[in-house]
Image: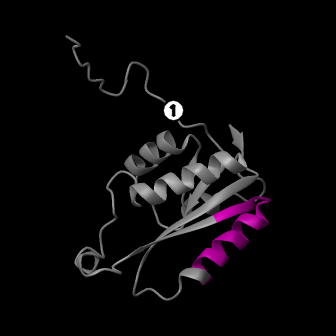
Amino acid sequence: MTLIRTAVLVGLFSAKERDREPRLDGLEARLGALGVRVQARFVQRRGVSDGGVRLLGSPLSRRFVIGSGKLRQVADACAAHDTDAVVFVNELSAYQRRWLSARLGRPVLAPADLERHEGDLVVDEPSRRPGRQPARTHRRVR
């Protein structure tokens, strides 16, 4: 069990969506009511370019929801601030949570997780499946 006191907010928004700041503000207020201080906020906009407009309804990455550059920025901010958790404005699948938690090295939460708490925000540590290692490639040197 981990007590969450600090967090980074992240949201994937359509370029047509105009209410992104109020949504982030609302989530930050909900976290504040649980005693969590937000250290940084990140927004990934979708549909800004011509190619992105066709893909407005889908995340940038099935695993990470956001793009690799934004994911790197979030990871860097988490490390710099020693953040306890990352909270997404968007709902996430179990698959996405697992990959994001592994990549960011901390619990990843969605708005539904906040509704279950009335006092302090406490989450279970992400479980790692024993024996499952990422595939490794070996290159033979001649």
Residue 141's place in the image compared with 94, above or below, is above
Residue 71's x, y, as percent?
47, 55
Give the SS element for disc 1.
loop
Give 48 or 114, whichever is nearer the viewer.
48
Give 62 or 135, whichever is nearer the viewer.
135
Q: Is residue 134 left or right of residue 74?
A: left
Based on the picture, tell me whether residue 45 belongs to the magenta stretch.
Answer: no
Quadrant the N terminus occupies: top right
Q: How many marks?
A: 1
Based on the picture, tell me whether residue 24 belongs to the magenta stretch.
Answer: yes
Residue 130's place in the image compared with 116, above or below, is above
Give 45 or 101, whichever is nearer the viewer.
45
Residue 77's place in the image compared with 105, above or below, is below
* Image: magenta residue range: 22-40
Picture residue at 37% right of the left edge, 24% below the top: 133
Residue 57 position by quadrant:
bottom left
Residue 27 position by quadrant:
bottom right
Q: Which residue is mark 1?
A: 127
Residue 26's x, y, as percent?
65, 77
Picture residue at 54% right of the left edge, 56% below the top: 73
Residue 43's x, y, as percent?
52, 70
Magenta: main secondary structure equals helix
Kind of residue at badge 1: Ser
Taking the view exactly as shown, the residue that stands out farthest to the front is 142
Picture residue at 19% right of the left edge, 10% below the top: 142
User: Is residue 84 visible from the viewing direction of this image?
Assistant: no
User: Is residue 97 visible from the viewing direction of this image?
Assistant: yes
Residue 94's x, y, as percent?
41, 48
